[in-house]
Image (tube, rainbow, N blue to C red):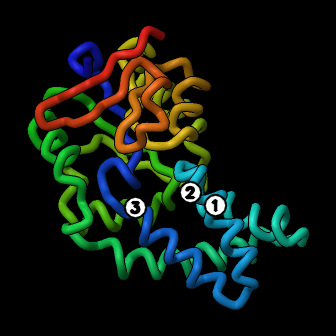
Amino acid sequence: MLENYKVLLWDFDGVIMDSMPIRSNGFGTVLQDYPAIQVKQLMDFHNLNGGLSRYVKFRYFFETIRGETITEEEIQALANSFSEIMLSSLINSELLITDSLSFIELNATGYEMHIVSGSDGTELNKICDALGLTKFFKTINGSPTPKKELVNLLLKEYAYEKKDVILIGDSINDFEAADFNLIKFAGYNNVGLSDLGCGYINSFDPLKVSLNSN
C-alpha cells in the first residue's frame, strides 16, 4: 500500500517510540499536588487523545476538569516542567519501536518523510538528535502548533500533491488531521483505528496491511 505514496507523515509517540506510558507518568508527576481523581480524569482524556499536545491537555485539566482559568504563562511553565521530565526519560533507544524504525531506516531514500507530532517540537528535535533519528526525516514538527495545522503547513511549503501523501498514526487525532487536510491515513499500533482511513498497518516487517474500502 505505501508504495502508492511519495510522502510519509509519521506520528511519533506510539508509532516510532513506545513513549505513552512515560508521558502518562509525566502528567502525574507535574500534577502530583492536585486531587488524584482529577488527575485520573486527565489520564483518561490523554489516553483517548494521544495526538493532542500537552498544552491542550493542561488547559483541559484546569478549565474543564477543575473549572478554573489558567494563563498562557502558567501553561507554558507546566509544559516546561513536563519537558524536563520527558528529556530525562525518553532519550532511550530501548523505547524505539523496532518494527516501524526498521522500515524507516530501510526506506528513508525511497520516500520524503516528515514527523508531525503532538509532542513539543523543540523537545522532539532534541530526542531525535540524541537518538540519531533526525537524518531520516526532512522535517520534525510538533506542538504547540496543532497537528492539523502542521500538516497543512507542510503541504503548502513543499507543494505536495495530496494524493501522494499519507499520514501514519495511532490515535483518532491523527486520523482527524489527515481527514481535515484531505490526505490518506493509515492506522498503526491501535486496532481501534482499523476501520478508519485507507488501511491498517499490522506490521512493517514484513509490511502487512489490512485494506479498507474507503
Relative to 186, is 147 above or below? below
Measured along the vertical axis of the image, is residue 101 above or below residue 160? below
**Which one is closest to the eye, mark 3 or mark 2?**
2
Q: Quadrant of residue 55?
A: bottom right
**Going 31% across and 57% down the picture, which residue do you hit?**
17
Task: Give the amino acid type for the residue marked by disc 2 in the picture.
Answer: Asn
What amino acid is at disc 3?
Leu
Q: Residue 87's quadrant in the figure? A: bottom left
SS at mark 2 in the image: helix
- Point 33% across, 60% down: residue: 18
Q: Is residue 80 above or below residue 4?
A: below
Dot 3 crowding, Cα within 10 Å, few <14, some 14–19, many 20+: many
Residue under numbered circle 3: 124
Under mark 1, the amino acid is Asp
In this figure, which residue is indicated by the disc labeled 2?
47
Nearest the eye: 123 or 169: 169
For mark 3, give the secondary structure.
helix
Q: Is 103 on the left or on the right of 126, as rendered?
A: left
The quarter of the rendered structure image containing the N terminus is top left
Please tell me whether mark 3 or mark 1 is closer to you in this view: 1
Q: CA distance from mark 2 to mark 1?
A: 5 Å
Q: Please tell me how crowded label 2 is: few (under 14), some (14-19), or many (20+) other residues with Cα within 10 Å.
A: some
User: Is there a contact, CB below 8 Å, between mark 2 and mark 1?
Assistant: yes
State the image coordinates of residue 2 (x, y, percent, origin top left). Answer: 25, 21
- Disc 1 is placed on an element classified as helix
Residue at 54 percent across and 18 percent down: it is 182
- For mark 1, what is the residue? 44
